[in-house]
Image: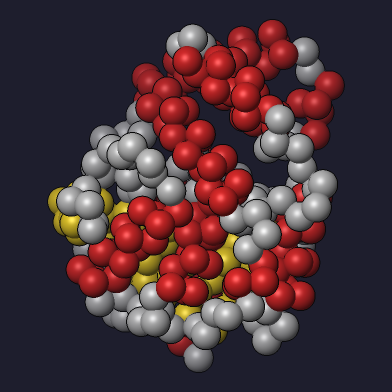
Amino acid sequence: MALVLSAAATSADGTSIGYQVIGTGPGLVILHGAMESASSHTELASELGDVHSVYLPDRRGRGRSGPHRSGHDIGAEVDDAAALVAATGATDLVGVSSGAIIALEAALRLPEIRRVAIFEPPLVVGDSLSTAFVVRYQDELARGDIPSALVTGMKGAKMGPPIFAYVPRQVLRALTVAAMRREERTLGATEVSMRALAPTLGYDFRLAEQAHDRLGAYAGIAAEVLLLGGESSPEYLRTAMNAIAAALPHARRIVFPGLGHGALGNRRFGGKPAVVAGPLKQFFSD
């Protein structure tokens, strides 16, 4: 299966959106989530590549793509998705976490989107999650304390093992520093480091804020929708998936037993791409 590293689309504001291509067949775009890049889903793309040309963009601000611009919002992210659709001819989308918010909005705004698979967008439903932590994240990032900002983001979004809720912050910070150093020694040529991704978290938090109260709008999506979730994901993400299912009663839904929020990622980050690929192949071939 071919891997193309240098392809790019140009978004409406002139920003270049770089992407990889894996496989051959009808086009499928995977929009990654927070603290991820195009390389985060290469194993899932390889699983799908026997029947699809899978396009893996670096969302803006990451890897091969251009920077965020002043006033960046969900509209710019949809423009980027539209540019990818136009450049590749793909009419099917997979959205992962914050990428799923973009996929929902793209399916609502872009009539050329035929099918969209949504995996656990971080929508806040009622008081399912407090976003007060974002202020602390922004302060730590502004001070240049990236390890502390990452800890704040992880704890605020309830990522990581449940035991992390009981581990002192200074211990988590030390573990994060060690993980960053270890990663930077072994980083692949196409991978993006945690240090480089940390500033993009704020834009993903903003996407979640902008998607608040959008459930009613999503009911207007004409594309076919597949809802995917993990049985072991944080409760607020399962609440969000329940709310989306209620807003889109004709959508198909699959819950993966024993899997969590990293299910679509590469195996070394806890993903199970071989498990997830089967239902995606069936949905996009129906």
Is residue 70 something that shows in the picture?
yes
Residue occupying image coordinates x 58% and y 80%: 220
Query: Residue at the front extreme?
Result: 71
Asked if 173 appears above or below 200 in the picture, the reply is above
* Spot occupied by residue 274 in the image (x, y as percentages of width and height): 54, 63
Query: Residue at the bottom extreme?
Result: 286
Residue occupying image coordinates x 62% and y 29%: 134
Q: Is residue 101 left or right of residue 106?
A: right
* Spot occupied by residue 217 in the image (x, y as percentages of width and height): 60, 72
Q: Is residue 15 left or right of residue 206?
A: left
Q: Is residue 129 left or right of residue 192?
A: right
Residue occupying image coordinates x 36% and y 48%: 59
Quadrant placement of the N terminus:
bottom left
* Spot occupied by residue 174 in the image (x, y as percentages of width and height): 61, 10
Quadrant location of residue 12? bottom left
Asked if 107 appears above or below 169 in the picture, the reply is below
Is residue 46 something that shows in the picture?
no
Residue closer to the observer: 50 or 35: 35
Asked if 95 appears above or below 192 in the picture, the reply is below
Q: Is residue 174 left or right of residue 82?
A: right
Colouring style? secondary structure
